Amino acid sequence: MARTTSPTPAESAPTDLSALLRPRSVAVIGASSRRGTIGAEIVHNLIHSGFVGPVYPVNPNALAVQSVRAWPDIGSIPDPVDLAVLVVPRDHVLPVVEACLRKGVKGLLVITAGFKETGAEGAELERTIAQKVRAAGARMVGPNCLGIVTTEAGTRLDATFAPTFPPAGTVSVASQSGALGVAMLDYAKELNIGIRDFVSMGNKADVSGNDLLQWWGADPETQVILLYLESFGNPARFRELAREVSRRKPIVAVKSGRSARGLVAASSHTGSLAGADAAVQALVEDTGILRVDTVEELFDMAAFLAHQPIPRGRRVAILTNAGGPGILATDACEALGLVVADLPPALTERLRGELPPAASVRNPVDMIASATPAQFELCARELLADDAIDALIVLFVPPITTDAEAVGQAIVRGAAGMQKPVISCFMGRHGVPAALSQLQAGHIPSYAFPESAVQVLARAARYGEWLAKPPGRPLVPAGMDLEAACAVVRAAAARAGEGWLAPAEVEAVLRAVGVRQPGALVARDAGEAAMHARRLGFPVVLKLVSDTITHKSDVGGVKVDLRNESDVFNAWDSIAAALAERGLGPMPGGLVQAMVSGGVETIVGVTRDPTYGPLVMFGLGGVQVELLRDVAFRPAPLDDRSVGELVRGIRGFPLLQGFRGSTPADVAALEDVLSRVGALAAACPQLQELDLNPVRVLAAGAGCVCLDARIRVAGE
């Protein structure tokens, strides 16, 4: 594919997985002649897939396995062995691995289950095996996996017990689930999607998704990478690799586990809005990965990406021989962010000259049921040739009088040489049945329903936009004293173990990182609050100070626009009465703060996911933030690209641009605040949660002011 390039010399060399994915010889330890057993099916698949090197069955009780000479153990094989496939009982795996390493085997594929998925004892045995493998300079896939497939012409390896060997191609697949791996291989064959490599990772004791991502990123024959993941071993490394690889070839991922579990001890607005899936989504959006929801959608994307160019924009033409599917496709385009383009008058005139009077030459172009293959070809060519169109969707409902195969041939001819993506929907025909063989030959994917085709094209268009933007550059905000900020956080964590910082500590942290705050003073009683108000200047805000009450406004603990001392005394009494009414005890203290008016209220936050690390959140602020849930996340630290995407990733962004004549807000100052918060989150591992809510974004050039802040810490 044109967009795929070989790695540059500056890029890191991939981990060597050649003994696993390009072996010259394979031993199967636990080989069997009894078909239906795993040891027999792997030997059968190796032989019948056409593996180009020798296969050595290892079975101490047999002279031959499936007509191939057998060996009593790995050490008795006289020739070198690149890859050893282990199909032995769990308690035999460690001594067999040790024997393989003594033999000099550099690739181990452990099919056997019963390790960390079964408990502590299995996990400890798995760790011991992995340590021995790494110490010997070998690599291991598994344990508890389906196996490995490669269709590479010089290898042709099927070291699995799956029933299907897929067609050869340019798509490489990693699956953390063996059961889904079987379905993936079947699906690839059914849809005739060419596979380059397939790896069932199992428990990922050694070789991980990161290793495979790096290997396939450097493999010039792999043009699309598909991932089914249940967990990330090293999310920070995955982020780094995926960002690099996505710029050269598309990565499509299914990440299971969209559960609503909260983060550990999350009690801030940010923490309550985040979760495991929010963290994953932030990671994939930051890296250009195309995330899909199902394995079917995974292969829908692969069918497109393996052969079609990435669209240069979102303008779509729809060509159909039936009005209903055209309407469905139009609705789907609008819902998914594609633009059903207005066709230029000259183009509509040319189409009108070739179609019957009953046809519609607006977009979608409805040629009506009598449309001939020649009309499909001509209209496809005309639409693709026009500069107003970035991609073409062709919909075909097979009437009795029109041959589907002839239409397929016509679409291929019409798309030839156009360098724009074409995607088709032969209604009710999923994949490439015989009638659509010409679409397959022309590398035009076909889908059963218009919505599926549009979803694929919409995701591809988003990927194209991601590619069009330059890579992010690190941000180094001026005037930050991260060491001073982290010293406050570390000291609080060491003192209290876990808890919320005192107002003075919060102020010290924000001052050190350069986040602007209004003047504020803590008062112990109403009289002191009035004195502080005179000192700061009216109007002021009075806020409850509490180590136990997170959301002060929920208990009547915030009073604004206090214009004189009487207002301050009344506000103090009102907060105290609200606390007493709720049984929350006496008024513990108040924060008197200079009042800031105007601008747009936003929220800036940090939460630390136990797996994915610190996430920066941004959204519209105030008390409705959890109701509206108009927020976006990105992993910390932020670069100049991700900070811009974070701000523009919420539905309410137009409010910052000057919605309906309002004054545009200082977006540059907001991005500066976010970059400072992201740097703080990355630098201070003890910082667990941070809420700046609201951050009032003032008019352009006037900056931002954080009106309220909370920080929770925990010891490492």
Image (cartoon, rainbow, N blue to C red):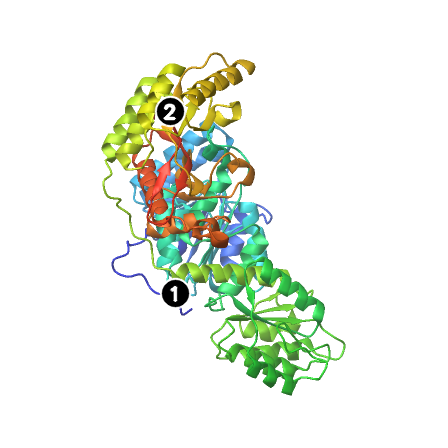
Task: Name the mark nearer the viewer: 2 or 1.
Answer: 2
* Above or below, comparing residue 281 to residue 118 in the picture: below
Q: Specify whether 127 is left or right of 379.
A: left
Residue at 71 percent across and 84 percent down: it is: 357
Give x and y (percent) for residue 114: 50, 34
Q: Amino acid at mark 1?
A: Thr
Find disc 2 in the rendering and name its residue.
592
Residue toward you, 265 or 110: 265
Q: Evaluate whether residue 342 shows in this view.
A: yes
N-terminal label among 2 and 1:
1
* Above or below, comparing residue 713 to residue 7 in the picture: above
Residue toward you, 490 or 214: 490
Give x and y (percent) for residue 98: 36, 38
Give x and y (percent) for residue 266: 47, 29
Residue at 38 percent across and 49 percent down: it is: 667
Q: Which mark is residue 24?
A: none
Q: Specify whether 679 is left or right of 87.
A: left
Find disc 1 in the rendering and name its residue.
4
